[in-house]
Image (cartoon, rainbow, N blue to C red):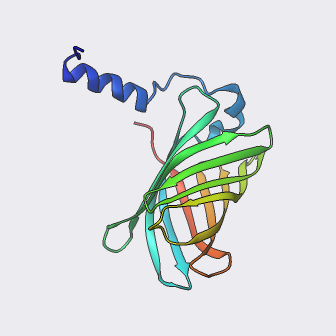
Amino acid sequence: MVLPPRRQRTTRLCAVLEPEPLVAPHPDIAHLAALLGTWRGSGHGEYPTIEPFDYHEEIHFGHVGRPFLTYRQRTRHAGDGRSLHAETGYLRSAGPDRVELILAHPTGITEICEGSVLVEDAGVRLELESTRIGLSSTAKSVTALGRSIHLSGDTIDYSLQMAAVGQSIRHHLAAVLHRAEQQ
């Protein structure tokens, strides 16, 4: 097999990973299109088993013209900048008022959340609860997750609830993110 020069291969790969911005969102996810783009901001985390912490976060919702949004998330500690967490996955429409969030975490956890989506003049509201959580043999024991995500204008605020390591479901994270300027 003869491969094209490395530069051509890289260009093709980038085109697959980062679609052309002119691709129209699939009609099944048109009601979620307001989420598209990059969002940055700060949040606060707490849980009975850890010290409270502040963090900076970036989330990116993209699309490839198919009936789902792509999702990328990463956080860094607000004090020293060290990487804290990352997630990647998909937000799928399950009908005009239902969504599914399918995520993989580098800590050995996979998460499937399902719930409602409400689209209003003021924005979009998602209320999600985990229906399945997969754990690798070395992952921390997480038994439930819930996410509330609210988009209003150019601001996303969210909270995340978690049941883990013997604790019942309770508040873990909250953040406010703002739409990043388009480049």
At x 20% / y 23%, what residue is drawn? Answer: 6
Image coords of residue 95 (percent x, y): 78, 37
* Quarter containing the N terminus: top left
Foreground residue, 28 or 131? Answer: 131
Residue 163 figure quarter: bottom right
Placement of 54 over or under 34, stated as above or below: below
Residue 26 figure quarter: top right
Answer whether residue 120 is visible to the viewer in this image: no
Q: Which residue lies furthest to the front in this view?
A: 137
Q: In this view, does 106 lie to the left or right of 145?
A: left
Foreground residue, 161 or 76? Answer: 161
Q: Which residue lies furthest to the left in this view?
A: 5
Placement of 183 over or under 168, stated as above or below: above
Image coords of residue 172 (percent x, y): 58, 74
Image coords of residue 23 (percent x, y): 54, 22
Answer whether residue 168 is visible to the viewer in this image: yes
Image coords of residue 44 (percent x, y): 52, 73
At x 63% / y 40%, what residue is drawn? Answer: 34
* Quarter containing the C terminus: top left
